[in-house]
Amino acid sequence: MRDLVIINARIVTPVGHSALKGDSMRELLEIECGGVIIRDGVISFVGPMEELPAYSELYQVIDAKGKCLLPGFVDSHTHMVFGGFRDEEFQWRLKGESYMSIMERGGGIQSTVNATRSASPESLKEKTSEFLRRMSAMGVTTVEAKSGYGLELESESKMLDVINDLAHEEDPFIRIVPTFMGAHAVPKEYKGDIDGYVRVIIDEMLPAVKDKALFFDIFTEKNVFEIEESRRLLKAAREAGFRLKLHADEIVSLGGAELAAEMGAVSADHLLHVSDAGIRAMAEKGVVATLLPLTAFALKEPYAPARKFIDGGAAVALATDLNPGSCFSGSIPLTIALACIYMEMDIREVVTALTLNGAAACGIADSTGSIEAGKSGDLVLLDFDSYTALPYYVGMNCVKTTIYKGVVVNENVALPA
Ligand code: NIG
Ligand code: FE
């Protein structure tokens, strides 16, 4: 591995080893003309050019004059491993059918479960690695990936094995954080017997997949896993050693945010229909609110109340939710534009939400998510000298170079400036 020096960059980064909350999300460190040194994949220096220490001629040097350097983006919520596609269902939704009614008549998640169960690990791996390459080109250096389209031990394990295999490939270009989501839906074999499926998750799956995932996630929703079942599952997962995430208050206001706070979850995600009490509880307990504007956009639902979270002192992260159903998009540029335009987030808040706070939602803010000595050399160079280009170029990719652990892993053609 060659060591890397970036010179003459406009450096912009949040600072810290945990999520930034409320107004502090707008506090970015900005260095007009700065340098970064990365040794053995880890940042050893960041500061103004006049303070840059001498470095050996063996280092690779990138002159970033006229370019803005940010921490690599963290996409902290995806369902990127799946068999098949659901374009037909998308057409039904365009004609007015709801996401939940399709799910209730056996389509939706269950149809991806059928396709994923019959897919080979190799085919899942190939498809997922194509998504990963696309994400890397958009500046993503860490991605969270959930299981949840197996809904039986063998297929859930297969999904997690695919995720872990990709995470440990030679020449890695992206970090992958694995999440077990056996509680994504009740599979058709257990229709009418939720209790039976809850027991399978607790008794068989949790112990068997313990070493394959860092997080446990659950779809806490009306007619899926309601509050009581969610609480039972979350407690069991916590006891088994998982950290917790919830899909909370996505379709209806059920109290998922409050439950996330009660359980000490790392994040609660979606939150389109969160209550004011839920926002307060999350802010108080330091649960990261992971907001997914692409899903609201694709489902034609109201956006999550980002302003209420931030103004109420909570930490907000932004992620794509890339999945074959509710949101078949992994677009970081569109996520940024929607957050600024429709959720009224300040671009500085958006930068924090996609970097340090995303890393906190993945439980790794101590080692990535900001440009600081001691953290992993995960960086993006924009085509422009200011991050304000990010929402202005609506849905267009402003990332020029993606750097993972000090290695250039992607170069894009430049946008017209
Ligand atoms: O985050 N709501 C549950 N899970 C996903 C959708 C999964 C799917 O439709 O396949 C979500 O929206
Ligand atoms: Fe999701």
Image: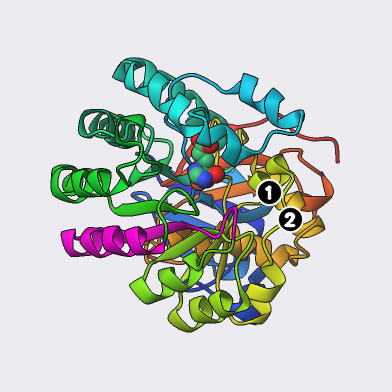
Q: Which residue in the rendered view is the most extreme toward the front? A: 192
Task: Point out the tag, 1 or 2, that comes first from the N-terminus.
Answer: 1
| Looking at the image, residue 165 lies above or below residue 19 | above
Q: In the rendered structure, find residue 296 and report the number of the disc placed on it.
A: 1
Residue 322: image x %, image y %?
55, 38
| Looking at the image, residue 6 lies above or below residue 104 | below
Residue at 44% x, 61% y is 361
The residue lying toward the viewer, choosing from 145 and 384, is 145
* Span colored in magenta: 227-252
The residue to which callout 2 is attached is: 302
**For the N terminus, which image quadrant?**
top left
The amino acid on which the numbered mark 1 sits, given as a three-letter code, is: Ala
User: Which quadrant holds residue 70?
Assistant: bottom right
Q: Say whether residue 294 is left or right of residue 221.
A: right
Mark-to-mark CA distance, 1 and 2: 6 Å
Q: Is residue 224 visible?
A: yes
The residue lying toward the viewer, choosing from 176 and 324, is 324
Residue 320: image x %, image y %?
58, 45
Q: Say whether residue 157 is left or right of residue 246.
A: left
Magenta stretch: residue 129 in it?
Answer: no
Residue 23: image x %, image y %?
65, 80
Ligand 1 contact, mark 1 (Cβ < 8 Å): no
The amino acid on which the numbered mark 2 sits, given as a three-letter code, is: Pro
Asked if the residue at tag 2 contacts the one at tag 1, i.e. Cβ–Cβ closer than 8 Å, the answer is: yes
